[in-house]
Image (spheres, rainbow, N blue to C red):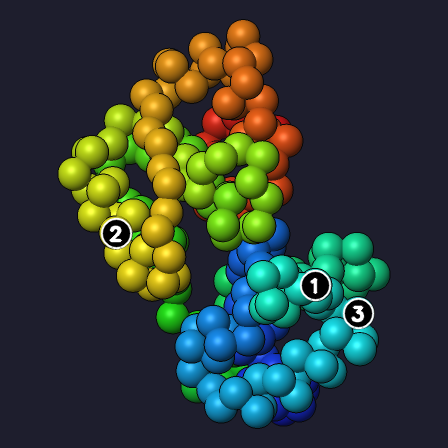
């Protein structure tokens, strides 16, 4: 039903990718790999979404990067629809309700963090958002297993095809750094980032 409403399966997958990853930038072949669709179809739908204003693009290192346009007038309702929450029918049979749900993408490895321990903050930045202010790509805060975090980052590196820089803080240390406004945490706050977890609202 959602595919019929929005015109194509590829378009729906792209909308899900962008709205579940605000502040993330993707280049075409990366997008094609994540949505598992033909590159010509992806290019066509990217052009359509950009012409409407739903996504924006810019060029860096001879690659064109795309990301969701958070200034788009319908950003909020589209985010509610495609930001990871399934759309259910209010009435009708279970079969009809299931038919009304969009086919959600497989979650990225970045969303599978529960095995790390008690994660209070998990943020992607740096190479993920093409903002090098913080000088780091992954920040993990909480009572976590260091070996599990290292494995997690290694899996992310394989998924993204790039070497990633990461740092881990205990919650008390991170809170203290925020309180004294040290340079690193100040840069984290100012950086463009994708917040996956912020249980205490420390990042504002």
**Camera-nearest label, 1 or 3:** 1
Q: Position of residue 194 (x, y in %)?
A: 53, 46
Q: Please, which residue is most extreme toward the top here?
A: 180
Of 201 and 17, nearer the camera is: 17
Please give left or right for residue 155 compared with residue 37 in the image.
Answer: left
Number of residues whose C-alpha sits closer than 10 Å to that of mark 1, classed few (under 14), some (14–19) or many (20 or more): few
The quarter of the picture where the N terminus appears is bottom right
Label 3 CA crowd tier, 10 Å (few <14, some 14–19, many 20+) = some
Residue sitting at 59 percent across and 68 percent down? 63
Q: Residue at x 60, y 67 (%)?
A: 62
Alpha carbon separation for disc pair 2 and 1? 28 Å
Furthest-front residue in this view: 62
- Determine the secondary structure under disc 1: strand
Q: Quadrant of residue 192?
A: top right
The earlier-in-sequence mark between 2 and 1 is 1
Residue 53's label in the rendered image is 3
Element marked by disc 3: loop
Q: CA distance from mark 3 to mark 2?
A: 35 Å
Q: Mark 2: which secondary structure?
A: helix
Q: Using the rendered view, name the quadrant where residue 199 is placed.
A: top left
Q: Which numbered marker is on residue 154?
A: 2
33 versus 123 height, above or below? below
Q: Is residue 122 visible?
A: no
Q: Residue at x 56, y 40 (%)?
A: 132
Residue beneath the point at 57% across and 84% down:
42
Residue for badge 1: 58
Q: Earlier in the sequence, mark 1 or mark 3?
A: 3
């Amino acid at each position: 039903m959602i595919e019929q409403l929005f015109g194509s399966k590829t378009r729906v997958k792209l909308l899900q990718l962008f709205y579940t990853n605000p502040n993330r930038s993707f280049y075409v072949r990366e997008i094609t790999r994540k949505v598992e669709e033909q590159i010509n179809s992806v290019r066509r739908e990217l052009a359509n979404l950009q012409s409407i204003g739903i996504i924006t693009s810019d060029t860096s290192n001879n690659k064109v990067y795309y990301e969701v346009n958070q200034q788009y007038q319908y950003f909020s309702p589209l985010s509610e629809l495609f930001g990871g929450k399934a759309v259910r029918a209010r009435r009708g049979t279970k079969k009809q309700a299931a038919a009304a749900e969009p086919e959600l993408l497989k979650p990225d490895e970045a969303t599978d963090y529960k095995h790390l321990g008690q994660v209070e903050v998990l943020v992607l930045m740096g190479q993920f958002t093409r903002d090098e202010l913080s000088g780091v790509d992954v920040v993990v805060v909480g009572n976590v297993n260091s070996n599990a975090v290292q494995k997690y980052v290694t899996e992310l590196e394989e998924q993204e095809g790039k070497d990633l820089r990461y740092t881990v803080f205990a919650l008390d240390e991170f809170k203290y750094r925020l309180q004294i406004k040290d340079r690193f945490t100040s840069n984290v706050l100012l950086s463009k980032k994708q917040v996956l977890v912020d249980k205490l609202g420390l990042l504002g």
